[in-house]
């Protein structure tokens, strides 16, 4: 007895699907990474635009590496450690990693002491951990240098990152975020 053309098509389709699944092609096995970017104007991309800011660039890097990545931004220009701390409870459910900017330069401009800034930074980290996420501070000073230092990594105002600096921050954060996401609850 000869099989019908439709039956043959279904058989070949079943074989093809089995091969694709065995090879891992077309399966939805990409690791999901949910990142929350919490901060002030540099997290917002002031002067370069949100699409060129490090959170957007980080999401693109993670996706290019095959991750199902989402980076949600909660940033307010001019915010301080106190304001950022108050928004640390807005971390979405399921977030694995929170990359945060303290807005410490804004604190200094408002006369806050280094000890108050440090205490708020520690409270931000504790709030992030209380949500079951891993906390990573955006490494602006480490990679780009201190704000208002006249460094080439800042825009003319000496405060806001250039597009190249945003890219550098995102590239630095990507492997840390990947590692941290695997440790998150």
Image (cartoon, helix red, strand yellow):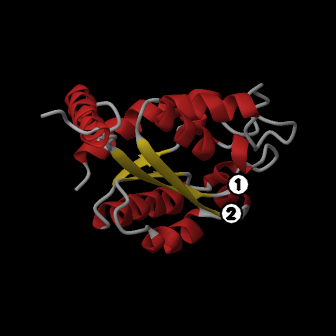
**Residue neighbourhood size for the residue with mark 1, other residues' Cα within 10 Å, grouped as few (<14), some (14–19), many (≥20):** many
Asked if marks 2 and 1 touch (Cβ < 8 Å), the reply is no
Q: Is residue 144 left or right of residue 4?
A: right
Seen at 47% across and 46% down, the residue is 137
In the picture as drawn, the residue positioned furthest to the left comes out as 1
Label 2 vs 1, first from the N-terminus: 1
Residue 31 vertical position relative to residue 18 in the rendered view, above or below: below
**x then y, percent, for residue 4:** 25, 39
Q: Is residue 51 left or right of residue 85?
A: right
Q: Nearer the viewer, residue 73 or 65?
A: 65
Where does the C terminus fall, quadrant-wise? bottom left
In the picture, the disc for residue 41 is 1
Report the label total: 2
Q: Is residue 145 visible?
A: no
Q: Which residue is mark 2?
A: 111
Distance between mark 2 and mark 1 Cα atoms = 19 Å
Where does the N terminus fall, quadrant-wise? top left
Residue 144 vertical position relative to residue 69 in the rendered view, above or below: above
Seen at 76% across and 34% down, the residue is 162
- Of badges 2 and 1, the one in the foreground is 1
């Amino acid at each position: 007895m000869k099989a019908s053309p439709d039956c043959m098509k279904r058989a070949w389709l079943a074989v093809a699907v089995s091969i694709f699944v065995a090879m891992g092609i077309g399966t939805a096995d990409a690791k999901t990474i949910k990142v929350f970017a919490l901060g002030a104007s540099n997290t917002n991309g002031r002067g370069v635009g949100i699409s060129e800011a490090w959170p957007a660039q980080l999401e693109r890097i993670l996706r290019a590496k095959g991750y199902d990545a989402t980076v949600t931004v909660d940033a307010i220009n001019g915010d301080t450690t106190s304001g950022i701390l108050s928004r640390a409870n807005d971390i979405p459910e399921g977030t694995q990693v929170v990359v945060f900017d303290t807005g410490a330069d804004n604190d200094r401009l408002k006369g806050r002491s280094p000890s108050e800034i440090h205490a708020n930074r520690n409270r931000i980290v504790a709030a992030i951990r209380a949500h079951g996420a891993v906390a990573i501070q955006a490494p602006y000073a480490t990679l780009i240098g201190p704000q208002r230092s006249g460094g080439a990594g800042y825009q003319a105002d000496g405060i806001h990152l250039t597009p190249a600096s945003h890219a550098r921050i995102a590239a630095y954060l990507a492997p840390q975020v990947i590692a941290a996401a695997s440790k998150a609850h």
